[in-house]
Image (cartoon, rainbow, N blue to C red):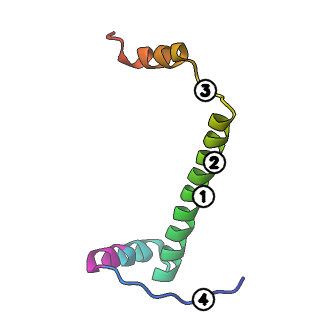
């Protein structure tokens, strides 16, 4: 895998937090930043795929019935 250098600006508080985490993990700042980017990408790629699936289901007319939705929310709103 080819690696490229990027540059970005951040505030001192975030930079200090990155350095604190890096020190606790006995890693360098680059490792922590790459780990954070990997996690961010995984979360958002998963979210985008789930949205695409939901849109495909909606386009196919696969919706929950009004009764099913009401029953679901009734379980969480009934006073117990």
Q: Position of residue 64 (x, y in %)?
A: 58, 23
Please state the extent of the stretch shown in magenta in the rendering.
Answer: 11-17
Does label 3 or label 4 sit earlier along the sequence? 4
Quote the CA–CA distance across marks 1 and 4: 21 Å
Residue 52's disc number: 2
- Asked whether disc 3 touches disc 1, contact meaning CB atoms under 8 Å apart, the reply is no
Pair 1/4: label in front: 1
- Mark 2 and mark 4: Cα distance apart in space: 30 Å
Q: Residue 65 location, x and y as percent?
A: 57, 18
| Residue at horizontal 49 percent and vertical 68 percent from the top | 36
Question: Residue 20 appears in which quarter of the rendering?
Answer: bottom left
**Vertical arrangement, residue 29 with respect to residue 62, above or below:** below
Q: Earlier in the sequence, mark 1 or mark 2?
A: 1
- Which of the marked residues, 2 or 4, is nearer the chain's N terminus? 4
On the image, numbered disc 4 is attached to which residue? 4
Q: Which residue is mark 3?
A: 63
Mark 1, secondary structure of its residue: helix
Residue depicted at 63% across the width and 51% down the height: 49
Secondary structure of the residue carrying numbered label 3: loop
From the image, tell me which residue sits under label 1.
Answer: 45
Asked whether residue 25 is drawn in magenta, I would say no
Label 2: which secondary element: helix
Q: Residues within 10 Å of mark 4 (few under 14, many from 20)?
A: few
Residue at horizontal 72 percent and vertical 82 percent from the top: 1
Vertical placement of residue 20 versus 2, above or below? above
Query: Residue placed at 55% from the left, 90% from the top?
Result: 5
Of discs 3 and 1, which sits in the foreground? 3
Closer to the chain start, of discs 1 and 4, is: 4
Secondary structure under badge 4? loop
| Viewer-side label of 2, 4 | 2
Task: Give the main secondary structure of the magenta stretch.
Answer: helix
Q: Nearer the viewer, residue 39 or 69?
A: 69
């Amino acid at each position: 895998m080819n690696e490229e250098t990027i540059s970005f600006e951040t505030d001192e508080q975030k930079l200090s937090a990155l350095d604190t985490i890096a020190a606790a993990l006995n890693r360098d700042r680059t490792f922590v930043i790459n780990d954070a980017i990997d996690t961010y990408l995984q979360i958002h790629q998963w979210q985008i795929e789930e949205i695409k699936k939901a849109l495909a289901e909606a386009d196919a007319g696969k919706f929950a019935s009004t009764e099913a939705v009401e029953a679901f929310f009734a379980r969480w709103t009934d006073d117990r």
